[in-house]
Structure formats: structure tokens, C-alpha cells
Amino acid sequence: ITADESCDNFTDLNLSHCFVGTSLYVRLLLYTRSNLRCGRELNHHHLSSQPLFNVSRPTAFVIHGYRPTGAPPIWIDHIVHLLAEQEDMNIIVMDWNKGAANLNYFTAVTYTREAALNLTGFIMTMEVRNGASLSSVHLIGVSLGAHLAGFVGENLKGKIGRITGLDPAGPMFTSATPGERLDPSDAMFVDVLHTDMNSFGLNGAHGHIDFYANGGADQPGCPKTIFAGKSYFVCDHQRSVFLYLCALNRTCSLTGYPCSSYGDFLDGRCLQCEAFKPAPCPVLSTSQNTSFNTCNIVFVLCVAELSYRVDMVTWNQYLRWGVVYIRLHSGKSYTEARVDHKLLRFEQYTSTRLLAQFDDDLQHVQKISMRINTGNVIGPRYKIRLLRIRFTPLERPERKDVRMKERKEPRRDGRKERRKEG
């Protein structure tokens, strides 16, 4: 960048603009590996005027959502840099802050159709005048931007290569028909990440693949009470963006498992991907595996640091109910998983499967301890006997299964004794 060149930055507004209200104005800011720190505004009708734009490269459009304060999204620079690391591509940030920045959310909703027409026209110019392929276009829409992306895809008859919806907005869209919101027909491949379905996000399945992080609603680490202020309202909803950044950065593997309900997932019933063999489980990322395009199956996303599938057979003669605590030990350090989403049933010669999710990872697990809390405070403390137990690590193929079972050995008095073998 020479001294006489200036960057085209995302529109920065403030609360005064939001109070007065803004009218729609769309800007398209281009970033490539050559100008990652300095956006270039594109002319909607004359792409040839911008030499940095290369029509032979794939193009990703980043589309933000409702901006009630008018400030630029804090994640824009991060997603631009991470997308550029994946592949040499054109990265275009759709800046419709003038339009999205209104205290009246319903005004911003009405602007999504008009903004979608604007972007549709630009993409048609890319295709007709410059020879771009629609299949190489990827729209990444956040919240209200996810539906905006869907409208663009609908305008282009579903010929867009891919749309990724990050927690599509729920208010004003909960009762919408497929033509009034993001849906699978809007692109050749539509994947959706849900993180706030019970508030600002949209409930249900709306893509070829829907990932539900921690069940798609309340996210770990987010405030549970209104006393936390703004974070209480936006934390779960914004988590979709930060999980996507995490996936792009490859600092976490966001793997989906087909499941009919989150309860079944927590019970450990959906921890295999038989429906997709020989392909692996689908992973949220920028890469697209076309073998998943027609599955239309609900997925649940496991985002713990470390997860185990636990299979055990109980021997106790009398029925017991309780919650399970499992600890992994490494020297003086330990990490604990609490399986308490419901009371588990333990009875004689019955197999039980559950999912244990640990917030921390221990590289060298030396010991595993387990306790079952039956909830008895005043009465007797019951013990539950296990015939065998097996710990199977998920997403960590380098780790071996841990299996323990009881075996009988002769005692000095001639009778047989049971003890644990590991």
C-alpha cells in the first residue's frame, strides 16, 4: 500500500444514527491475500476497475446481521484473515450497516429483501459480464444476514454453490415459510449452525445439515441471569460466530453426530456415524463434502475439550437412580464430567451408555474415578456395583479405549472373590 492510498473501511455509526434511523446503503469491500489489512470498495457494475478482484478465484461473501448500536462487528477482521488462510479467494464483506443500524429491528428486517436484490445484481454481473461460476460462490450470513443470504440464493434459483447460516435470526422468522427465510433450496449446499434457538436464533432444521452446538440453545460460559447486562442477551447468539472462527482456525474440531434429539445425544446413543460410512462424521468447516448434501438429518455438535463414550453393566440387585460424576486424574491434576441432565437408572445386569464431556484435557490420564450420587442426604449411602465399564474417546483416535471388568479369584477360605481388573 503506497502512502497516497487509503483503505475503505466498514461503516462506523453510533447510537445517534440508530435513534434517528438509517436508510439502506450497501457497500462491498474486497479483501484478498494481497490486501488483507486494507479493504477496497468495489463498483457494483464495473468489476474490471478493481485489479485485485480475480474472477477465476472462488468468492466468499461475509454478510453481517442486525446492528442495534451501529458499531462495526468485532469479528470482521478475524474472519477475513482466517478465510484467506483456507484458500486464495476473493473475500467480500457486504457492509449494509446503513440499514441494519436501527433501534427498530423490524425496519432492518424489511431492508433484507432490498439488500438481497442489491447483492443479487452484483453476483449476476460477476457471472454474466466477467464469467464467474455461481458454484464457486459461498455466502456466509450471520443472524439476519443468514436470511439475506437465503434471499440472494432464492433470487439466483438456488445455483449458488454454498450458503452457511450462523444462528439465523428467529424474531419475525419463526412462522415464516421456506420462501420467507433461509432454506435448503437456496443453494447447492446449505449448512446451518444453531446456538440460540430459544431466544434470538431460529428453531428447527433449515439446511442440508444443521449443527446444534450444545443442543443449539444455552451455551456453556454464557450468563444465566439478566444481571450480567448485555452479555445475557447476546452471548448465546454470538457464540455461533466464535465457534465458526474456531473451526476456521482449526483450534477445535466441531464434529456433528446424527441424532433425533439432544437428550438421546447426551445419553450416548448417537456417537457413531453409520449413516455416512465410509465417509467420516461431518465437520463444520469451509470445505464442502458433497456426500452430505442430501442427508437432511439433524446433527448435534459436541464442543467439549474432551469427550468419552461410557458403557457400563451394573450388577446391583436393587434398582437405583442417580447422577454420575467421572474424574480423569493425572498426578495431582484432574478434570471432572458431571452427567446430570437426567436421573440415570441402574439395575441388575443392565447396560447403560452415557456421554462424558470434560472441559479440560489431560494428556496422560493415570487414573479414572467414578461416583454415582443417588441423592440420599439422610438415608443410607447406597453402593452400585459394576460388572464392567468401557471408556471410548471421541475424536481422539490416538487414545486407546479403557476397559475394566470384574474377575473371580479363589480366596484363602476356598470361596471366590470378585475384584476389578484394569
Image: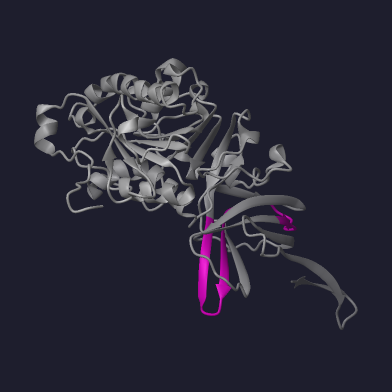
Tell whether position 316 is magenta.
Answer: yes
In the rendered view, would you say 60 is above or below 343? above
Instruction: Count numbered badges in the picture.
Output: 0
Q: In which quarter of the view is residue 16 placed?
A: top left
Residue located 35% across and 37% down the image: 92
Residue located 62% across and 28% down the image: 294
Residue 391 position, x and y percent, is 67, 60
* Magenta highlight range: 312-338
Dominant secondary structure of the magenta stretch? Answer: strand
Out of 376 and 77, give the one closest to the viewer.
Answer: 77
Residue at the right extreme? Answer: 414
In the rendered view, would you say 339 is above or below 410? above
Residue 52 position, x and y percent, is 35, 41
Q: In which quarter of the view is residue 150 placed?
A: top left
Image check: 130 left or right of 402?
Answer: left
Tell whether position 185 is magenta.
Answer: no
Residue 284 position, x and y percent, is 52, 44
Out of 95 and 173, give the one closest to the viewer.
Answer: 95
Residue 194 position, x and y percent, is 45, 37
Residue located 45% across and 19% down the image: 156
Image check: 247 left or right of 324?
Answer: left
Residue located 51% across and 59% down the image: 305
In the rendered view, would you say 340 is above or below 90? below
